[in-house]
């Protein structure tokens, strides 16, 4: 791949945006490659870490890629937007937890990638922003993932001003879950990964799917959906092992 690096260590997959000279900004190649990587996560994987090479997480869209949009028709721009939407969706719908290792600036679409991840841990010096309006465009595709994280109230400020903000503000908004010193960023991510590994692998996958599915249902349908979900899980071998291990005061066979 030209724009993505992957590394596997046991059940951990690390996906690195690898355009450090352009602060890992995305173009057609990165969009296509990142979508492909997240669409084919190996079955034995239990956690994915998404990060950026060099000193940035992702600076959003590549300037040259945006420049080419000026000469495209509305239909051609819709095609590009659909491809970008597919990239975010592939991260969001990855069957296992995705942890954003926000090692530097995450601007515009970069903040969108952070929002599409399940867990986000940011370096204290990371910078965020929804800067699209300053270019005369809108944070459209990423809003699907950003709005559920920060809410419409915060979006009314940060979407409309295009201002940048730091990791502490991102934490208060709910865009990230934790802020760490740069030197301890990997340590904190490793700690969260260890917590995930204490959980039943299939239960984690099912829980991630439940969050996505139940959140969009009317209350009555959500109740019925969750009843079916727990009834189906309780009879699985993994649930039998987990509950048995708890009652017998031993570790389950997945730890």
Image (cartoon, rainbow, N blue to C red):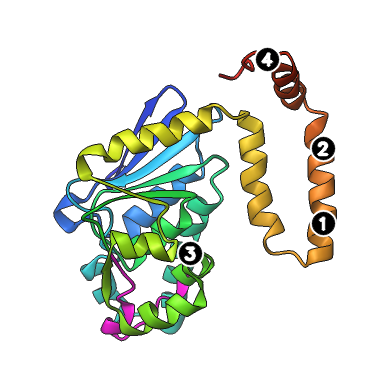
- Mark 1 and mark 4: Cα distance apart in space: 32 Å
Q: Residue at x 31, y 86 (%)?
A: 136
Q: Quadrant of residue 142?
A: bottom left
Q: Residue at x 42, y 61 (%)?
A: 175
The range drawn in magenta is 128-141
Q: Quadrant of residue 48?
A: top left
Identify the residue under disc 1: 223
Q: Position of residue 183 (x, y in %)?
A: 20, 39
- Mark 2 and mark 4: Cα distance apart in space: 24 Å
- Mark 1 and mark 2: Cα distance apart in space: 14 Å
Q: Mark 3, residues whose alpha carbon is within 10 Å: few (<14), some, or many (≥20)?
A: some
Q: Residue at x 70, y 23 (%)?
A: 242
Q: Quadrant of residue 37?
A: top left
The residue lying toward the viewer, choosing from 74 and 24, is 24
Q: Position of residue 7 (x, y in %)?
A: 34, 31
Identify the residue under disc 4: 249
Asked if one can make out residue 45 in the rendered structure from this viewpoint, the answer is no
- Mark 1 and mark 3: Cα distance apart in space: 29 Å
Front: mark 1 or 2: 1
**Residue 85: mark:** 3
- Mark 4 and mark 3: Cα distance apart in space: 46 Å
Identify the residue under disc 2: 232
Q: Secondary structure at mark 4?
A: loop
Q: Position of residue 225 (x, y in %)?
A: 81, 53
| Residue 192 drawn above or below residue 228 | above
Is residue 159 found inside the magenta-colored segment of the image? Answer: no
């Amino acid at each position: 791949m030209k724009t993505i690096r992957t590394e596997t260590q046991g059940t951990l997959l690390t996906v690195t945006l690898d355009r450090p000279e352009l602060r890992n900004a995305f173009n057609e190649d990165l969009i296509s490659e990142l979508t492909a990587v997240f669409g084919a996560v190996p079955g034995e994987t239990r956690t994915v870490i998404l990060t950026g090479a060099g000193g940035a997480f992702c600076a959003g869209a590549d300037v040259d890629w945006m420049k080419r949009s000026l000469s495209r028709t509305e239909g051609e721009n819709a095609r590009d937007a659909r491809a970008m939407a597919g990239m975010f969706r592939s991260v969001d719908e990855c069957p296992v937890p995705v942890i954003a290792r926000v090692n530097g600036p995450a601007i515009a679409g970069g903040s969108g990638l952070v929002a599409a991840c399940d867990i986000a841990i940011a370096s204290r010096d990371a910078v965020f922003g929804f800067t699209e309006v300053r270019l005369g465009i809108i944070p459209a595709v990423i809003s699907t993932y950003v709005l559920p994280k920060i809410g419409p109230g915060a979006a009314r400020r940060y979407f409309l001003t295009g201002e940048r903000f730091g990791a502490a503000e991102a934490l208060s908004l709910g865009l990230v879950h934790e802020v760490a010193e740069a030197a301890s960023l990997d340590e904190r991510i490793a700690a969260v990964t260890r917590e995930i590994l204490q959980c039943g692998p299939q239960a984690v996958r099912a829980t991630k799917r439940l969050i996505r599915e139940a959140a969009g249902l009317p209350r009555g349908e959500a109740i019925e959906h969750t009843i079916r979900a727990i009834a189906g899980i309780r009879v699985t071998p993994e649930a039998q092992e987990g509950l048995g291990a708890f009652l017998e005061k031993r570790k389950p066979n997945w730890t």
